[in-house]
Amino acid sequence: MSTNFYLPQKADKEISYSLSTAGTFTWTAPNANNNGLPYTITAELYGAGGGGGGGALYWNGGGGAGSGGYLKATMSVTPGTSYTFRVGTGGTGGNNPNGGYDEWSTGGTAGQSSYITGSPSGVTSTLTAGGGNGGGGISDSAYAGIGGTGGTNSVVGTGAILVNVVGGNGGNGGHYANGANGSYSTQSGNPVGINGGSGGSIVGSVPNERGGGGGGGGSYHAVGGNGGSASNSNNTGSGGGGAGYLAGSNGGLNAYPSTRTPGGTGGIGRISFTFLVTNGGSAGSAPA
């Protein structure tokens, strides 16, 4: 009588890696299934928020910045192939360059997108969560800064979208008025996530009100920065920074004769991803 012996099958194991520091990283896909064949990762990406626009002397508040988009998607990866990961840096705030004297100001810069990309066998696949656009500065004393739009997302190649959230828009700065609040992010046109920042308040009475900065857009994970508020007859507020994975910072005050506080900084992005290790395959190591 013969006896058959069977080795126990190794249990599947889910592996998770995350990147919460802005910058560019590389990752070599391990042989996760111990067979050399492609397999699927599931990734979550947050684009970075934009920087708020600077306020200008007298009347006009800077625009709030847009928040970064959020994307959850799958992507096929091939063992031994190197992939590039970028976690977006938040945009910087605009400023009044002449210490409060000038009636114009610069806009904030856009937040960087966060992405994963690679080209196994010469075919490129990319997942991208867009960065928010910067809040507008003041180029004409008759107009306040315009709020920046939120980041949009894309998938190229082998990826498939699971959740697609467009970043929230920044609020317009106030022209003789309060700054507008930043908006929520949206999924299929419906508000989702965390609220945008509050618009800054005005000061003064007709016809000498000084405008507040617009609030930064809220992301799927964090709140936008508040717009700066005016505090006397010669002051205006800068726009709030848009949220990324982290919150945008608040806009500040531009005051005659010499105080200049830039718009808020955008929140940085984030990337996390998971995959299954089966049949004694390798988990590899985190992107570095």
Image (spheres, rainbow, N blue to C red):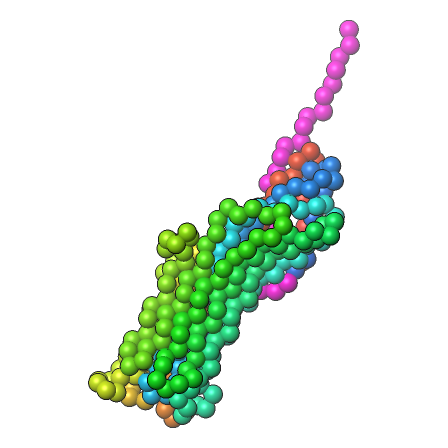
Horizontal side of 42 relative to 51 (left or right) equals: right
Where is 137 relative to 182, above or below? below
Q: Is residue 182 magenta?
A: no
Where is 206 relative to 25, above or below? below
Where residue 17 appears, as percent x and y from the top left, is 60, 50
Q: Residue furthest right?
A: 2
Q: Residue at 24% of width from left, 84% of height from top?
A: 204
Determine which quarter of the picture holds residue 116.
bottom right
Determine which quarter of the picture holds residue 173.
bottom left
Q: Is residue 11 magenta?
A: yes
Q: Residue furthest left?
A: 206
Q: Quadrant of the C terminus?
A: bottom right
Horizontal side of 121 relative to 264 (left or right) equals: right
Magenta stretch: give its range: 1-24
Determine which quarter of the picture holds residue 255.
bottom left
Q: Residue at 41% of width from left, 65% of height from top?
A: 169
Horizontal side of 40 relative to 224 (left or right) equals: right
Where residue 214 appears, as percent x and y from the top left, is 36, 73
Q: Quadrant of the N terminus?
A: top right
Q: Residue at 72% of width from left, 45% of height from top?
A: 79
Where is 5 relative to 43, above or below? above
Q: Name the foreground residue: 140 vs 9.
A: 140
Query: Is residue 226 in view?
Result: no
Q: Residue at 67% of width from left, 31% of height from top?
A: 10
Query: Is residue 114 in view?
Result: yes
Where residue 111 appears, as percent x and y from the top left, is 52, 68
Predominant secondary structure, magenta span? loop
